[in-house]
Amino acid sequence: MQTTSPRIRVSIPEQRLDLLDGETVIASYPVSTSRFGLGSEPGSFKTPLGRFQIGEKIGADAPVGTIFRARVPLAPNEPPPETEDRILTRILWLEGLEPQNANTRDRFIYIHGTSHEETIGQPDSHGCIRMKTDDLIALFDAVSTGTEVVIAA
């Protein structure tokens, strides 16, 4: 039974996201962080480190597998974006809370679904944190805007 506001901890070495109630892990999911390493430089495609919060939740009512372009669901007959890093199903948009990661929202760093579930568990993203669809939906439903996120190396 959850007694406090949940928080999220992402371990880069373990490629794992834990949902915590206090210090108790209430759910744990494999993830994929950046194949380009760690950092906050604009245009680097790296995963930032430090303290964040969920700034916005997008896609609550979208069907599973919905493809997003610029955080807007594609129309049913619209061609998918020309990218290997498609953003699917749900988006948790991160905001940096420290000077070194304050540009995270402007870098469009999300926790999101992917069409590359086979690479979950190893670094493969373009800076975001990718999750399997079912795991992402469970996490999305368990957190709210303002939920604390810590990404650690």
Image (cartoon, helix red, strand yellow):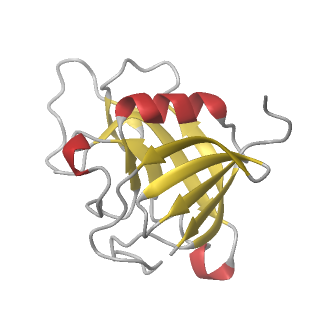
User: In the image, what residue occupies the spot 41% across and 43% down?
Assistant: 112
Q: Residue furthest right?
A: 3
Task: Give the total number of marks visible in the rendering.
Answer: 0
Between 153 and 143, the one nearer to me in the picture: 153
Quarter of image, res 53:
bottom right
Q: Residue furthest front?
A: 24
Expressed as whole percent of the image width and height from the top left, the position of residue 98 reads 69, 75
Between 31 and 71, the one nearer to me in the picture: 31
Expressed as whole percent of the image width and height from the top left, the position of residue 96 reads 63, 66
The answer to whether any part of residue 52 appears in the image is: yes
The answer to whether any part of residue 105 appears in the image is: no
**151 versus 130 height, above or below:** below
Expressed as whole percent of the image width and height from the top left, the position of residue 74 reads 29, 28
**102 versus 121 height, above or below:** below
**On the rendered image, what quadrant is the N terminus found in?**
top right
User: In the image, what residue occupies the spot 25% across and 41% down?
Assistant: 117
Expressed as whole percent of the image width and height from the top left, the position of residue 121 reads 32, 54
Quarter of image, res 145:
top right
User: In the image, what residue occupies the spot 80% across and 42% down?
Assistant: 5
User: In the image, what residue occupies the spot 45% across and 67% down?
Assistant: 12
Q: In this view, does 143 lie to the left or right of 23?
A: left
Q: In this view, does 1 lie to the left or right of 84?
A: right
